[in-house]
Amino acid sequence: MESLNRMAIELVDEVLDFADELGVVVYELDSGATVIDCGVDAEAGLEAGLLVAEVQTAGLATVGTRMDTVAGAPLPHVDLTTDHPALALLCSQKAGWELAFEGDDGPGFDGLGAGPARALVGQESEFQAVGYYDEFDLTVLTIESIDLPDDSVAEHVADLTGVEPSGVFLPTFATGSTVGSVTMAARAAELGVFRLFELGYDPKDVLTVSGAAPVAPVSYDEGVAMGRTNDALAYGGQVYMQVREDSGVFDDLPSTASDEYGTPFETIFEEAGWDFYEVPDSVFAPAQVTVDVVDGPTRVVGKRDEELLAESFGLA
């Protein structure tokens, strides 16, 4: 397989070439690193969100939108399909890089990184399970944060990836932005594969995956935005998986298997002190999954909850 970072950088070049059309703003830091504002101060739209989702999956997924409904209301939904789920979703798209820095004279920086830069570090257990580690001299890490990253963030990424700061690209967006809502909706398939991996299933036995979820209405209140975008997945996300081996863990795959099912995510996050790592892993899962075992049974587990989605989204 070609370098994930190389494939992602080709997509970043497209973002840079069409920055004005996409509504993103590009900054070069003193270190030489490139920050792309995709939804902190910039008002980037749906197309920017789709391209960022492609960057996050290193170009190994087909991403698009379609119109569907939530509780009868027409809303855009994001569809994502990949024939390389272990690489595209676990080794690239997963938001597995916590970025937390204390500021000397200010509030510091807090963000969550996703994308193929993680494959240059390879410290998460997924990389050992998949057996993939990347090597390339340029890298991209998308960052979800209410602030744009500075040189301390860029140099940290450069340090861990072994890339010169001038080769670091950081597309950044707030959860409460259009790009935040779109890229989160694009995670239904990733959540399904990651949940399966957590349950002990070999990710190399997942052959192809398609996922879909509604694009949550944007709120500039980050607490509301975190709740809505996660509700879009846990109560509206649908996934199809084709897998090689049958297993007894499939019943525990959807969010309906969690004790917290039925509770809005904003409430769950508030009770956890807004700390993702204090939230039970089982709630980070799509609402409904079809598991198609090759030459075996096809199981459907879970269900959507459109009533909760309507309440979360503020549909009137």
Image (cartoon, rainbow, N blue to C red):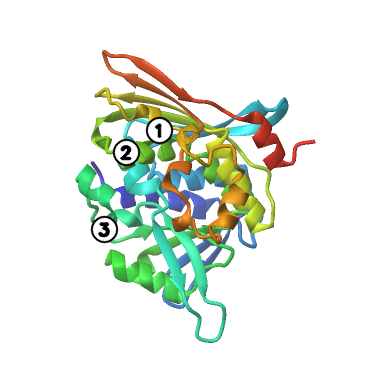
**Of the residues under marks 1 and 2, which one precedes in the sequence?**
2
Instruction: Name the quadrant of the N terminus.
Output: top left
Residue 163 visible in image: no
Residue depicted at x 55% and y 86%? 105
Pick the residue in front: 300 or 215: 300
Residue depicted at x 34% and y 69%? 158
Q: Amino acid at mark 1?
A: Leu
Tell me residue 14's x, y (percent). 47, 49
Horizontal side of residue 98 vs 217, given as left or right: left
User: Circle 1 — which element?
Assistant: loop
Instruction: Name the quadrant of the C terminus.
Output: top right
Q: Which mark is residue 199?
A: 2
Which of the 4 quarters of the picture holds residue 282?
A: top left
Pick the residue in front: 211 or 19: 211
Horizontal side of residue 270 vs 32, given as left or right: right
Pick the residue in front: 56 or 316: 316
Q: Which residue is mark 3?
A: 123
Tell me residue 62's x, y (percent). 44, 33
In contact (CB < 8 Å): disc 1 and disc 2: yes
Residue situated furthest front in the rendering: 259
Residue depicted at x 39% and y 41%? 59
**Of the residues under marks 2 and 3, which one precedes in the sequence?**
3
Cα–Cα span, label 1 and label 2: 8 Å
Q: Which mark is residue 195?
A: none
In contact (CB < 8 Å): disc 1 and disc 3: no
Q: Which residue is mark 1?
A: 253
Which of the 4 quarters of the picture holds residue 46?
A: top right
